[in-house]
Amino acid sequence: MNPKDLESYARNTWCPGCGNFSILNAMRTVLAQLHEEGCPIENFVLVSGIGCHAKIVDYLKVNSFYSIHGRTLPVAMGIKLANPDLKVICFSGDGDSLAEGLDHLIFAAKRNIDITLILHDNRVYGLTAGQFTPTSPQGFKGKSTPLGSKELPMNPPELMLASGATFIARGYTHGIETLQKLFREAILHKGFSFVDVLQVCVSFFNLYESYNRRVFEVKGNDTSSFEEAQKIIRSWSYDNSEAAIPLGKFYQVDAPTFDQVFPGYEIKAVDRDAQIKKVLEDLT
Amino acid sequence: MQDFSTLVGGTAGEGINEAGVAIGRLFNRLGYRIFMYYDYQSLIRGGHNFSLVRASEHKIGVHLDKVDAIVALNQETLKLHKKRLKESSIVIYDSEKVKVEELKARACGLPLSTVLNDEKAPAIMRNTCIIGGFCKATGISWPILEEVLRKHIPKEADLNLKVARRGYNAAEEIIKIDALDRPGFPVLTGNQAIGLGLLKAGLEAYVAYPMTPSTSLLHFMAGYAAEFGLKVVHPENEIAVMLMSLGLAYSGVKTAVGTSGGGFCLMNEGLSLAGMAELPAVIVLGQRTGPSTGLPTYTGQSELHYVLSAGQGEFPRFVVAPGDAEEAYSWSGVALNMAWKYQLPSFILSDKTLSESLYSFDLAAAGERREEEPLLWEEGEGYRRYSYAETGVSPLAYPPRKGEAVKVNSYGHDQMGITTEDPEITKEMADKRLAKGQSLARELEGYETVKVYGQGSTALLCWGSNKGVCIEAGKDLGLKVVQVVVLSPFPAGKLGEAMRGAERLIDVECNSTAQLAKLAGLYGLQADDLVLKYDGRPFSLEDLEEELGRRDA
């Protein structure tokens, strides 16, 4: 399968230079490769929230659920519980998963459900034209905070580490090969995998220059060590400092997944009438 | 004896509900039809709880204020409910805790704590001991009590029976309740009937966050999950509940959610998504006294208009309000079938009275419901999730389908499911959704969406759990009763037919704004009088008959 085969007829409406193009291209390539390797494309379901990121599902000729703001994960969890054989990939924004739907993100990690979440972390609300998000640096002057936001940013990988995610990585939309590698590993990981993608919004928060100067890829780190992962993750806290920004896989461990330990019964095999009769006898 | 009411009272944590249920089962075993109203507060220990168990030769769905027996585990029970006693009533009480001065009724005291101490039984068994005394006092034979306790309280059965026997032996027979020569029915709550109706119609998953009065449905489903191959999930909040159910539905799993008004508020965005994305959803909504936290463990019917219009935008929905256990069973199955046949949200609108009261359940009268298959996509040229059809219903396909993409969308979308804001498609899709509502309404022509009982020139208009009280008051006072079972699509035509011959219409509801009457008014049917109760308590038969008496009905 050629990645181009996965292109839908939808007209792309992202701004020229938008980081989302890299995520789309990387994902398309990975999906096509996985299909060739025996993971059929029809077994994938893509779920998105609302925001610029969410349009990605329109652009791919793959099963999808274009959901609502902040709610990618509960939808995805329903799909995974319905059919654990499906590969479920969520695309979500930083406003989407960290503000509107933070509860679901923490619970998805806590359950270690076998779902992948790609966080299009542009650190600004793009579609509503430029407000601060949970990962914007303190002092961000958006349209809702003209004097600069007074809040400190969240560190999403740190939050995920504390919540029980079993795969945590960070990518950057300049660097498509790393992105592809991380997406692929995240999808193949059994358990909740979280990829924070520094995705640049050229219209409202163009960080290309800053990121290009500061990012580096971590190598040789012990990804099974919670402490080491925590140390790497904490080396940059999404603030205004000039700290170097680590990219790559920070953490990966094996743990039972929710979809596997969830009591799975043979749905259709039940004689419902006989069971109902029995319940009614019990209640007589 | 045709009708016998018993009140069991004590503090929370003393097993007052269980005691009421046991007494209900005893009468059921004797061949009576029963109804039990359970009154409790939102606390775990303390407070005053009571169960009102009514047994009758006929099918009933309402309690009486006056009782034939009081079973008092504490003084407060007698103090609060003495006024319910009649000349002929009896009182069974804990002689070590309750003083019975100036009581007209015949009384029988039992030393419960002494018995429990002797038998080294836990304090919770006071209720079994006093039930033993109740049976002796009412002439219910020991073998029947033993059979009922062994079957329904199997935990520590021997000790329970010993304690019950001591209570039985310590009492004396005051009156004699005759056994009716016929078998009992299953005795179940409205929630259990809803659960069974959904399971019968093919439910495969139940998702809920606990909230009174729907919590017991979650417990029931979780308890029977293995037997029915049911997936039961209790997620982080009602937002997740609703969205999870839509993920399950997208994948072809028949799912229901359960909640009360507050939880349903959180589900609204998901509800609107179900409307737009055309995903089947079943919502069991148990109403309680609102607004906000209100009276969590008390009843109300104030969510009708809310349910009819909840969720942004316009989309069709099915709303049914069952009136008793049989209707709860039967119509819950219909609700599930309609959700899947028309790919829309379906509501089972209950209230605390229906959800948590106990009914004798007649399966034969409920009628058999079958799982109905939704319209499924056959292999063919490229699958389009929202393909146009005259009925508005597009065939369903669930992933994985080789070579196809199943795309659902909360945005305005085209037939493929891809986002569009094109004005023509926007209108076509809105028309498609409306067409589904019309198709649903056509199908419902074949159902008894409005029920009529009795006849008379004055008619009572009711919905939901008020069915029981209205039918009985109607019978006593010679009134016709019209029950609107389906609230959406509104059965205006059938309601008009039902009203034929009635000159006066009295609306009976458990809310303060007469929501059904207002709804009927939109279709040109005006209520002449209103009987509204909104103190959190259901109508007793006397309540309604007195109110109707004041109105010269």
Image: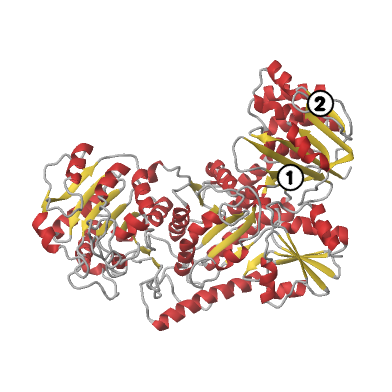
Looking at the image, residue B249 lies above or below residue B359 = below
Please rate how many residues cluster around mark 1, counting C-alpha atoms within 10 Å: few if below 14, some from 14 to 19, many from 20.
many
Q: How many marks?
A: 2
Q: Nearer the viewer, residue A166 or A142?
A: A142
Q: Earlier in the sequence, mark 2 or mark 1?
A: 1
Say which amino acid is labelled 1.
Answer: Met
Residue under circle 2?
A: B109
Answer with left or right where residue B133 lies relative to residue A160.
Answer: right
Residue visible at 83% across and 74% down in the picture: B503
Q: Nearer the viewer, residue A181 or B134?
A: B134
- Farthest-out residue, bottom: B424
Looking at the image, residue A48 lies above or below residue B523 = above
The picture places residue B77, in percent across and down from the top left corner, at: 75, 36
Residue visible at 14% across and 63% down in the picture: A208
Identify the image quadrant of the C terminus of chain A.
top right
Please rate how many residues cluster around mark 2, counting C-alpha atoms within 10 Å: few if below 14, some from 14 to 19, many from 20.
many
Q: Quadrant of residue B42?
A: top right
- Farthest-out residue, left: A213
Q: Does label 1 lie on the same chain as label 2?
A: yes
Secondary structure at badge 1 equals strand
The picture places residue B531, in percent across and down from the top left corner, at: 76, 62
| Label 1 chain ID | B
Q: CA distance from mark 2 to mark 1?
A: 24 Å
- Farthest-out residue, top: B118
- Mark number, residue B36: 1
Residue B303 visible to an observer of this rendering: yes
Say which amino acid is labelled 2.
Answer: Gly
Of discs 2 and 1, which sits in the foreground? 2
Answer with left or right where residue A275 lies relative to residue B387.
Answer: right
Identify the image quadrant of the N terminus of chain A.
bottom left
Q: Nearer the viewer, residue A144 or B87?
A: A144
